[in-house]
Amino acid sequence: MTTHLAPDRVPFRLPTPPISGILRPRMLAVCLALAAAAFLAFCVETSVGDIPIPLTDVMKALAGTGDPGTELIVHELRLPRALAGLLVGIAFGVSGALLQTVTLNPLASPDMIGITQGAGTAVVAGIVLGWDAGMSTQALGLLGALTAGLLVYALAWKRGTTGYRIVLVGVGVAWICTSATDYLMARGQRFQAQAALGWLVGNLNGRTWDQIGPLALTMAVLLPVSLLLGRQMRILQLGDDVARGLGTRVQVVRIAVLLVAVGLVAFGTATAGPVAFVALAAPQIAQRLCGTAFPPPVAAGLTGAVMVLGSDLIARKLVPDTELPVGIVTGVLGAPVLLWLLVRANRAGSGG
Amino acid sequence: MSKENGVRPAGEGPDLRAEGLRLAYDDRIVVDDLDLAIPPGRITAVVGANACGKSTLLRALARLLTPKAGTVLLDGRSVHSIPTRTLAQQLGILPQSPLAPEGLTVIDLVGRGRSPHQTWWRQWSSSDEQAVNAALRATSMTDLAHRAVDELSGGQRQRAWIAMAVAQDTPVMLLDEPTTYLDLAHQIDVLDLITDLNRHQGRTVVMVLHDLNQACRYADHVIAMKAGRIAAEGTPAEVVTAATVEDVFGLRCVVGEDPVSGTPMVVPMGRHHEGEGRAADVVYGRSVK
């Protein structure tokens, strides 16, 4: 009758080493399905393009047993793009899940609280004003996102930072950055504005290994950290007083989670631009698929990867001979999925 | 500390006290120069008018608020110098009307009460499981364990939160108005449950209560606060007298005897009844039957 299932829980306990915990079969199943979908999208992404390459040939090229021409295309063109989509999707999904959990607010995704907008302003300033100090677009985006993230945290600080203050201050910072970006765009030359716009929409076109490296490295460090923070982060959901009473160092956990989330989104944005809606929707979609009381980070990351890769495939195939930037499709595609999940939950008599 | 809800002998438990405590929000001093010793192994009720500093005091005892001066000591050590995790194994706090995230099940909420005993690789040890099951049984929540907390009635929800505090398995429990927003039957349910925790498991309980009659009936020790200071403390019979109630609450009343428990029972007078009937007999010193 109700789709609002009690999250099933299966305790497990090993005698040696003394590892124990709760397995959630539904969440595991959802994660496996999402991982399969992401892998499929990843393979298709490497096979389609101006020169279609059959999946079997892609596999051979990946294994290093294909013909040299195919290997070149796969390694230098297709693989960086597909990897960028995969990593950026995971980074945005996990980052959104962290921020939404720690602020207790589904609106608190990096593209709502100014982090993405900060990256945008920095990149557009670099393009239009030439203030790039020799830095690449990626480095500028990174700098902008980190600055905006720290600004939000500093301004929200008042005897410790509460979740709703972060959201309110973040919305303010987001609008300041948006206005600054709009001003710069209006001032800029036409071709500069065009270039800036191309980046602002979120784009996987022409990614190279140079851009993948820093992102992959960051994620190799930050993803395990975010998993380790998960348990304490979920205790923060009970409110600061309860969490502190349960022995959680509330401010330390909160600032650690924020730094990890900002780091992930900053490197993600630096690589692909602010791909719209992924960080907001992926955690919420994942939470409803898994039936949990919090956005589960792993499932959110995988949902983000499926969203970005799927959207990029559609963007490349939708209009013949034009490659739409991926950011245009993610919003169009992600919003209905989220709305459908919300409506379905409402019908079942729960707020979702 | 005994484990798994082992019985602690009555009258024994950690020594929780405050010395020269000054508590303030920014520059507004709420509690000043307060000394306090919580009787170990007993139930203590903190009563007083609104904004007299009783919740603030409870927050300070639970190190949720850093004092401007003075210290809170647990077994002789300042609570602020004890690592927060170690302290959370000794002292539990249930704030007033806490909120559970949507969709969180009772068993997951109660399980989070175990977090001071857990590490990231050991999140469901057999002692966790035993403590959670015992807490669910003690609060009669076993049948509702897999329901979402936000779908429960007010009384059930409060019992779920108390179960979380019980599962934390601390010898000292601080409860801020555990009966708020509950109807009378559920208030009594919760207070009976708290009494069980004290009598059967020897837990020291400190709770803020609004209802003086309930404080008299359920507490061994009553602390009456007025304007950030202790106006009176002792057994219910020592503290709850017509004179103290008038001093602390500014309310004229008759103090009789609870026909069920024999503890003091406060019957407020109010402006419209002061000169009337049996109240007049009391006020004018005539005997009341």
Image (cartoon, coloured by chain):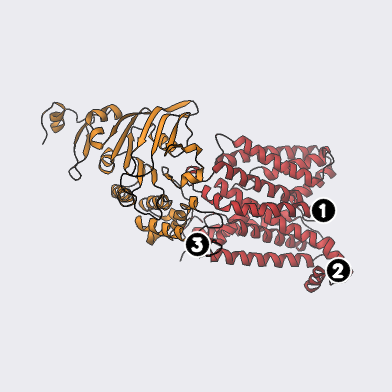
Can residue A268 be seen here? The reply is yes
Tell me if I can see residue A208 in this picture: no
Q: Which mark is residue A343?
A: none
- Which residue is denoted by mark 1 in the rendering? A210
Residue at 56% x, 45% y: name it: A103
Q: Say which chain is red.
A: A
Q: How many marks are shown on the rendered structure?
A: 3
For the residue labelled by badge 2, is the local secondary structure a helix, a strand or a loop? helix
Q: Are marks 1 and 2 on the same chain?
A: yes
**Sequence-wise first label, 2 or 3:** 3
As drawn, the label of residue A7 is: 3
Q: For the residue labelled by badge 1, is the local secondary structure a helix, a strand or a loop?
A: helix
Amino acid identity at mark 3 = Pro
Give x and y (percent) for residue A311: 71, 60
Q: Which residue is mark 2?
A: A70
Separation of residues labelled 3 and 1 (CA atoms)? 42 Å
Going from the N terminus, do you reach mark 3 or mark 1 first? 3
